[in-house]
Amino acid sequence: GRAEREGPRGRGEAPARVTTDARVEGGRAEVPGGEAMAMERPSPPERITTRGKDKGRGKAKSRRSKYVTGALFVGFLLPVCLSILFNREGCYRIVQDGVAAVGQALGAPVTEETHEEASQLELDDLGLWGESAKETTSNTVRVLLPEFLEDVFQKVYKEKLQGPLHRIYDKTAEFHVVSMDAWLQHIKDDVKKLSASRYDMYAMVSTWIPTFVEQEALMDLSELMTDLGPHYWEDIMPQVRENVAIYENKVYALPADGDVVLMLYNNRILEEHGLDPPNTWHEWIEISKKLYGIDLNGDGVPDGGSCVVTEPNGFWAPLFFAFAAPFLQRFGSDEGIFFNPNNMKPKFRDPAYAYVLDLYKEMVQYSPYSLTGELSSNDAHAMFLNGSCALYYNFHGFLRPLIPELSSSGIDYKLAVTPGTKLVVSADGKQIEECTPQNCPYADDDGVNRAPFYGEGGIGLVVNAHARPEVRRAAASFAISMTGPDTSLEIVTAPGSLLEPYRYSHFEDVEDPKSETSLIYQQHGWSHNSVLQWKNCTIQAWEHLNGVRDLSIYGKAEYTSTYGFEAILREFLKLDISSSDILMQLSNAWETLTNRYGKSIQLHLYRKNLGLPTSKEGMPAIATFVAIVAILGLVVLVYYNRKLSKELTVKRMESKMRMSTWNSLVSNEPATRLMSVLKKISKGKKPDPNEVLALLVRLQHRGEDLWKPDLHSSDFAQAALDNKAFADYLKFNLGLSKNKGHPESNTFPSTSSLGQPCGPRRGSSLDCSTPSGTPSTASLSKSKSKSGSLVAPLEKEGKGADTFGGSTRVFSRHGTVKKTPDGKDVADPISDLSLSQWFVTKEHERVSTKDIVTVESIGDWNHDPFQTNSISNKHPILTVMYNIFQQSTSLGGVEAKHLLKGLRINEEKLWNYVQVIEAGMDENNVYHNQVHVCDVLHTMYWMLTEGALADSMCLTQLEVFCALFAAMIHDFDHLGVTNEFLVRTGHPRAVMYNNKSVNENWHAAMAFYTLNYGDSDVRWDEDWTEDEIFEFRSLATSMVLATDMSRHFELLGRFKAKMAGGFVAGNNPHVHTDDTNDRWCILHIAIKACDISSQAKEWKLARKWADWVQEEFFLQGDREKELGLTPTPLCDRFEVNMAKSQVGFVDAVLFPLFEPLEKLIPALSSVLAQLEYNRSMWQKEAEEEARCCSEIDCSLPTDVVMPKKG
């Protein structure tokens, strides 16, 4: 009898497959409703015999045994051993897969039996009376549905899906209906029966799905989704997919519905009372207050302003959370509003939650609750229909039955997403704070944080994992077709289904009232206007990135039940109980439930539901293998990393040795050595008497120049042999020479490049000429001169005229001449400050802020100012300054875009002033022009933000703005020549400032002269107090003066002294953020770094900047030669090796500056790496040039062609 029951399987053949009349094409079978699915697996191939008498089999077998041994260890034994350690649950699968791999290597047949089929083979011997051989297959797919879905599912099944289901799978569908109250319990009871369960498919609320997935009760449908085209999956709105279909990155349900809470308002009532629809819950409450107690519908009975459901019915809790959601969630759907996802503490524990609870109570007080008592959903429906309230919110599934009635009654209603809020609970839950782009990144343009609440999430069709394989396949196909685009529209539009449109195709062409989709809605009582409103609100809600997911953990119903949360909330509304007491009750109740189910289990489930990462208890087989590979790869990487690290260390040591000469020279100043001695004394060590004596002698001879190194030593002379030009630059341009003059020329010729002499002057020749053809002030104020600049270049004098006191004052580029009424000249070189009249008139043309381009690279260290100059039509300073104050980055504790307002700065006048400053930059200067100022300004912004200088030093808003302002004016009205040149030629500016920081004094003085004495439309500080003006000017002026390179070593030494003692960013005992002097000291060194940072930018920018600054030096050297002067160091184009000079500048100036600054600004570490690279490029260029010069004559011709500017 057993042999008869076994049939062909007793002879070792594969079991017979169930055949259907499905139409098969390319390995796929037709699915009910036309969807494509992978067909059933084919029968296994016949067993391949391995017996034979081939004499060569022995060697092959020997080779195979070696491979098998290796495969056995790597593919089987090693993973098994590791899995025993990390994943005991997965051991069986690893062993099975390993045996299959070894069997395949030995030539065994590859079978594709599933674990279910393998288990069934073992059960064939069970039963004394042959029970296991009895027919157990089923021709029915049993579906469990709630009663409100029965009619529409039966209708669609009979009309569309019954035939295909029977034809393809030889199955019929059987619907079992339960009441809403018994729905969840029926599913729980059936799932407990495992393989003996009655139902093959369930309609399930999305918040229940995670619980059953964790019990392994639902079939994973992810693989089936790969067989469907994108039209099925991508047609579902994003948040519906996330809430209904997906759990832990797998698909367990096919969405049939999506739930969200929406709002209805009576437009007629609002307009009659002059009210706008509410955007926030605060506005909702204000509207309710104004309408409360008024007879809104003319029935003689006072009405409530808004209809708020307050009857405990299991759906009141979601409506409360829909109100609370925007106050609690700000950072997206994975934040959650119920628990702290890190410790599972209820949000009710947050003290600020009391504000939300009190606000909700206030809303309820101005509703019919205070007039008629608790309000059910049906009561609220009726009141809104008869005009007894103007506002109403509920599940959109509950609102939908109202739509046909509202349309037919002619009520002017509108549908909208629920209100939001401009006040939110802070991250620590202790206070209420205003929404900003930082704490409410998904807020509307008007600053309202919205958080649509997806109460219950929606309904999906799921397949019982314990159903028979062939039934699961049929059930999945049936669910796909039932929820597909072609079928689902009829289901969601049917009256009484309570299912809502959730696909984009459900609204396809609804703008056309005669389209096929619109006609389907109209057949079910929808008006065209209703469909359009429903579409807009639904899409807006289901695409919102800050949508709130409902609670989905074990016992969810108990957390929000009528005898739990709703009962406590009901008590709060009825009794005089404080919100803090109610929050304590709610928190205790929820924590009791959490502990009962297991806190760690609930936390794990809650984080999964939010899409947050969770820790795994075990490692699956694949992960184990990946871990092994990763560990081996890590070992290899560590080996090569150590090898590379050694190579880099060697290169770094070599680089430091190359730099050690200049570094040691510039670091050898008395102040540093004195501090070293004092440190030894403070530590109880006895200093070297000889060292102390030498130091005393040095201090006596050096006087106040304690911070300047001695560059007259034999060591310096030895270093200068290889780079004389740069050595001379250090000695004279950095203000280190004793006589402040040039060593070879301390006398001056009788003529100057600045013009003809205007009278006898000892040792100098000033340009006091009076040019003719003076242009108007209007043409010179903002519009550029013919040469492209407001102020003419050095050799092309600009001029302006003004009448004052009966005489005409002619404003020269380098001096002022008074003309008496009879036309005689009166020299007045010191009144050069009258130049400000050039920059300020009422008629000058301005660039409108709306025409300023947006710069995407704001905040990037390698921002390209040349490109900004190009795209801004030569307004780079205005463009960068304006863009800075449009950013949301924090500056001085506020966003940059709010800084000007916080400082009471007149923005319109500020932009006028910025344009005046920009007009004062001579674009004919090769280097010191508006592009350089733009670069320094943006670098200062980087220091403050990306470098975190503003935060780490706790800079005030005034100091932050002053830092940017100083960077903007630091080269205002620059002549394109050095201080040394102005001093040597006796320029009026040098005379005015007594040869001290001539350029820098002029830049600051002219900038503030323009601000204080210019036209009123540039006085942006008119609302400032006297103390603010004094502090601002003091800091700005000191910062501009700090850019004088003759003070470089003095300021650097003082800064290094501040850093002495070992600095850790943010925790330096020697730098006190509450000390104004310390903060200003840091700002001085910061603007110095910004001013000379061009060689720390990416190589293409650094190379270009070097060309321009060197060319400006060369032009000065050419002028000095014309005057009979010996060219200033680095200014003789026939003597300077630019590559070697740049190497020296990097070693002696930039590295000693940026290395200590990096301790304060850690972000400069990448800048130092770039500086190191650029130095290597210059070194390489210098070496190539030296090699070239050793082979050919490198002397330059006398007719050198100057590079064009641009």
Image: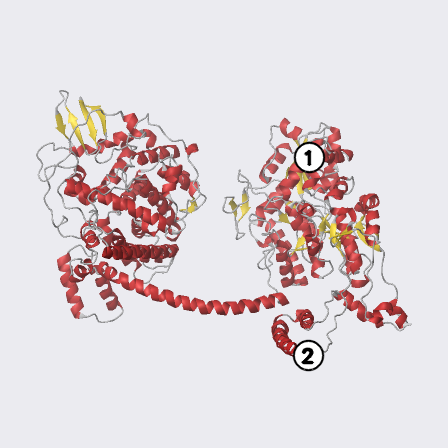
Q: Earlier in the sequence, mark 2 or mark 1?
A: 2
In what element is the residue under mark 2? loop
Q: Quadrant of residue 201?
A: bottom right
Question: To which residue does mark 1 refer?
Answer: 509
Marks 2 and 1: CB-CB under 8 Å? no
Residue type of the residue flagged with mark 2: Lys
- Residue 166, given in percent of the width and then of the height, sits at 84, 51
| Placement of 603 over or under 534, stated as above or below | below
Q: Quadrant of residue 625?
A: bottom right
**Residue projecting furthest to the front:** 55
Q: Is residue 391 visible?
A: no
- Whole-Å distance between the Cαs marked 2 and 1? 75 Å
Residue 264 image label: none
**Horizontal arrangement in the rendering, residue 287 relative to residue 890 (left or right):** right
Residue type of the residue flagged with mark 1: Asp
How many circles with numbers are drawn on the protein? 2
- Residue 45, given in percent of the width and then of the height, sits at 76, 65
Crowd band around label 2 with a 10 angstrom C-alpha radius: few (<14), some (14–19), many (20+): few
In what element is the residue under mark 1? loop
Residue 55 image label: 2
- Residue 356, given in percent of the width and then of the height, sits at 59, 46
The one nearer the camera, 386 or 663, is: 663
Q: Is residue 924 visible?
A: yes
- Residue 237, given in percent of the width and then of the height, sits at 66, 45
